[in-house]
Amino acid sequence: MDKTFEIGSKQFVLDKDKAEEAFAAKSVINGRQTEAFNLLPLKYQWAYELYRTMKANHWEPEDIAMGKDIEQWQSDNQLTDAERWIIRMGIGYFSAAEGIVGDNILHVIRELVTAPELKLVLGRHAHEENIHADSLLYMISSLGINPHECEAMFEQIPTIKRKNEFVTRVSHALRRDVDLTIAENKKLLAKDIFVFGQCMEGTQFYGLFGMILSLYRQNKFTGIGQMFRYTLRDESNHIELLRNLFMDLIEENQEIWTEDFREELRETMREAVALEKEFIEDCLPVNSLGLSCEDFIRYIDYIADRRLEGVGLSPLNPGVENPFPWLAEMMDISKEQNFFEGRVTEYQKTSALEVVSDDEL
Ligand code: FE
Ligand code: MN
């Protein structure tokens, strides 16, 4: 007997028994191991839909004009030292952070999950980290910044080093053959997915995102700001991807969702937030851009709690409010999908597939 599957505008007719068997063999972890990329029948529909959304958002750094940024960077009177410092910290931190995320996606998470549609969307995620890394090269070369200086920042600024160690500590523990039938190892993977998606990409990226977008709002570094807006749009999909993956992993392995484990994850977010606050103080040694360090610190508390709630964990600071309503317009969780309404990339125009609408995400 045959069964018809519909995916977007496409239709596939599969043998019913075989399809059901293949479907049943799919799971986030410990599913059927195969080198063949058996996407059908889709079990994790969200993963395929997110893959299509991510693909429709494709961008390349060279699409963005850097002339004005270069002029400002080279001028003697258009920028303050504090503004230049934020750009240096942004380039220095993200140059390495994007690579660390891509590496964990490709060599840890994508290696350990078994359903092909999950591997598909994770492959796209890793590629987007390549694009982000490439965009930083483009910024470095456009402004004429010494790349060794960027590398040195990552190795020598203690608050950057600590953020780095916080995430790699978890991913290194999974960089081997792990037996994912053991509850402790399942927890380790769940924690890795939580740390990278909700703590790092979801929270620790947002201090600098906010600062760079506030420069952009004042017409400073508009090329860099534009690239960060594209990056931020991508990151919001990465946060959602890793949130869905985390939720499905927990759903399929409920024995790990204990009170102790939930508390461990909240404590992990507490650590991420503390590290981000120290980092923000390094980025904003003086109050500038019309933004205070205290407001940024409160903003991080606010974002972290949204991430915790997103994965069913209780907030650390219930009732904390967003101190930057204008930033919400540009990058807040519910509006991230459509802040590009005025600019549709060529890639999207030439895509044959319909785009998943905003409210489905
Ligand atoms: Fe990224
Ligand atoms: Mn990312």
Image: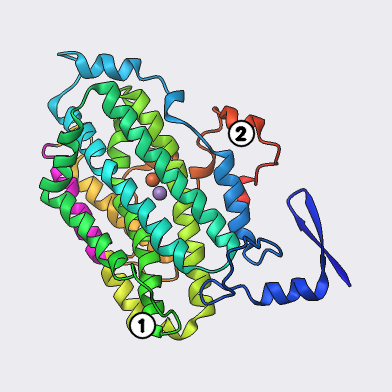
Q: Nearer the viewer, residue 143 or 207?
A: 143
Check residue 125 for magenta coloring.
Answer: no
Q: Which mark is residue 324?
A: none
Amino acid on which the number 1 mark rests in the picture = Glu
Which residue is pictured at 33% across the width and 43% down the height? 324
Residue 294, can we see it?
yes
Identify the image quadrant of the N terminus: bottom right
Query: Measured from the top left, where is residue 8 in percent x and y?
Result: 73, 51
| Image: magenta residue range | 270-286
Q: Tag 2 or tag 1, which sits nearer the N-term? A: 1
Image colouring: rainbow
Q: Is residue 348 left or right of residue 242?
A: right
Query: Measured from the top left, where is residue 329 in percent x and y?
Result: 44, 39
Query: Measured from the top left, where is residue 305 in percent x and y?
Result: 35, 61
Q: CA distance from mark 1 to mark 2?
A: 42 Å
Q: Which residue is mark 1?
A: 184
Q: Ligand 1 quadrant?
A: top left
Crowding near the residue tagged with mark 1, few <14, some 14–19, many ≥20 C-alpha atoms within 10 Å: few
Which residue is pictured at 56% across the width and 72% down the height? 33
Residue 306: quadrant of the picture: bottom left
- Dominant SS in magenta: helix
Q: Which residue is mark 2?
A: 348
Amino acid on which the number 2 mark rests in the picture = Gln
Residue 93: quadrant of the picture: top left
Label 2: element kind: helix
Label 1: element kind: helix
Residue 2 vs 281, above or below: the answer is below
Query: Measured from the top left, where is residue 273 in percent x and y?
Result: 25, 59
Q: Is residue 216 left or right of residue 164?
A: right
